[in-house]
Image (cartoon, grey):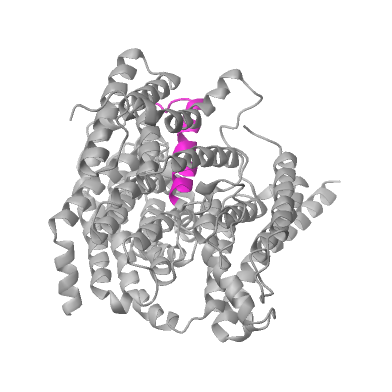
Amino acid sequence: MQDLFEGVRLVLAWDVLIAVLASAIYGLVVGSLPGLSATMATALLVPVTFYLSPIAAIATIITASAMAIFSGDIPGCLLRIPGTPASAAYTDEAYAMTRKGQAELALGAGLWFSAIGGIVGTISLVLMAPLLAEMALSFSTYEYFWLAFLGLMCATLVARSSPIKAIASMLLGLLFACIGMENPAGTPRFVFGITDLLGGIEPIPALVGVFAVSEVMRAMVTPEPPKLPDRKFGSILAGQWALTKKYQWPMWRGNIVGIIIGVLPGAGADMAAWVSYAMSKKWSKEPEKFGTGHVEGLVEAGASNNASLASGWVPALLFGIPGDTITAIAIGVLYMKGLNPGPTLFTERASSMYALYIIFVLANIIMIPLGILMIRLASKILKAPRSAVMPVIILLCAVGSYATGANLFSVLLVGVFGIVGYVMERNGYPVAALVLGIVMGSMVEQNFVTSLIKSDGSPLPFVERPVSAVLASLTLGALLWSAVVWVFNRARRLKATAAAR
Amino acid sequence: MQLSDRITGLFLAGLGLAAAWGGSRLPAVPGQDVGPAAFPMVIGGGLVLCGVMIAFGIGHSFEVPDEDAETGFRFRDLRVLVPPGLLLFYVLAVERLGFMLTAFFIVGTAAVALGARPRLALPLAVGAPIFIHAVFAKLLRVPLADGILPALW
């Protein structure tokens, strides 16, 4: 109980409250601008978190990401352009509602069910994390190796791309992580005589490069999105309670699916929204209405993507394994602020964990009034021309990456990763898998090499302990799943061609 | 910059080979069977395998086609190189010119490249550096270079 009061005291500090409010506004604005994703909003915040207290730093990440995921719904609903990838699943549906004159209902559902999803996700985090922490205390390097490997495999499994390209992206990320001396032997690898590379590739320049610079590069060659016409909105929250009662079951299903996908290492809010929208359509009593402006899918997927945000913190806090790209950034901030992820975080720094839970709830509560304000101002904010927003982003990329270590080499890395990210995306290689590879590289190698040394080169101890055996079979299952689907699809196609002849 | 799967696949396979070869030449740790070479060799092997499979088009059927996929090369597509070029310029120029002038040039060029008229690009190129300098150098104490045009505060 004392830890809970201490947590409340930590959150009520003036710097934390200002950080929550400022990052909420920042997240809402950035998330609503098409092309600027929640991950990019978070990555650009990291340099600022360097200069904040630990709780204020974590508060900015939590609040900005939650707000950005919701406000990505706004341009999706009004312009048919998703503000963040997490809104893409139901953009067509929301836009169809706008065309039917139900923009308020669609935006209100996005806001209301996002907030509910966020709070349910937080409750799952509060309940699940301490239980898993006790179990995780007995984990050895074998379990950690399989967990990290499973996280990487999940990232490739859920990518909406060729699984082989996703695995290649992940391996490329791991190869980048090999650069430098940060390996168990302390040997400089792949540094090519460049002293700046001895310290390895920091995740932040890589993240800023692949998520922000590549987006500015993309903006250079794609046409500007259409401007939003001025419009007056009616009541945003009217009818939401009735929707909550009517679609109670889909809402809970969305929450639960979001939580499960969030906890899976590597799979994040966008995947949660896609899966939940598809499930909503499949189990709906009125599937024929989907695509014509039906709110049910929005209820389920809107709750799901915000629920996954909170539960994505479970593997991040417990094992240092990111639940998605946002928590990949958060892990870096946690280490930087001395809140090293691991099961002991819940025993030794319990008050900080309570503070984190309170911030999650707070962020989802203030989302409602701020979200309504944002929706009302959307037509003004979305008028900002891309040629005014993107130049500031590119300058922020340069200054922000420089601020992380007062080193100009980071700025150069940002540019290089911008090109890498752009080329990869244009050719169907998912960049999220690359980023997870970079973030988790040293952890995977550390546990792989230590386990190999412990086992004297024998593979048996990797699967001897019960938990490691389960994790190993899950990982191999994830690996084989894609192969099975590929073989199945190919056989079906061959059969169809044979039948056509 | 859309390349065929054959090109990207073969590039990855080549990179994997180079990584495995580079890894195999790393010095071993005395008394240990597993050294710094193990991980790059495993990754290199994986990349070779994936690269070859991509080059042969395996798994292509899973891909969602890109809606705004470009066809052919147009000269104006070279504009994609403006953002990384501006970052390179920042690295080379900021210590000599100082943050203000470098940032003015970066914001102005990026705005013009994105089609902004001078009446938007100019005030943006003057205002954005002042605002960002105020936040980073004053509030966050990031040591931004003064160069030949120090900030007035």
Q: Is residue A442 left or right of residue A342?
A: right
Residue A341: quadrant of the picture: bottom left
Answer whether residue A451 is magenta in the image: no
What residue lies at 69% left-to-right and 78% top-to-bottom?
A457
Q: Is residue B54 visible?
A: no
Q: Is residue A482 left or right of residue A208?
A: right
Q: Position of residue A356 (x, y in %)?
A: 27, 65
Q: Position of residue A420 (x, y in %)?
A: 57, 41
The extreme top residue here reads B118
Q: Is residue A307 left or right of residue A188?
A: left
What residue lies at 42% left-to-right and 36% top-to-bottom?
A80
Q: Is residue A445 above or below residue A78?
A: below
Please provide the residue range marked out in magenta.
A204-226
Q: Is residue A6 above or below residue A364?
A: below
Q: Nearer the viewer, residue A447 or A7?
A: A447
Q: Position of residue A56 (x, y in %)?
A: 23, 57
Q: Nearer the viewer, residue A137 or A32?
A: A137
Question: Which image quarter is the N terminus of chain A in?
Answer: bottom left
What residue lies at 23% left-to-right and 67% top-to-bottom?
A355
**Principal secondary structure, stretch drawn in magenta:** helix
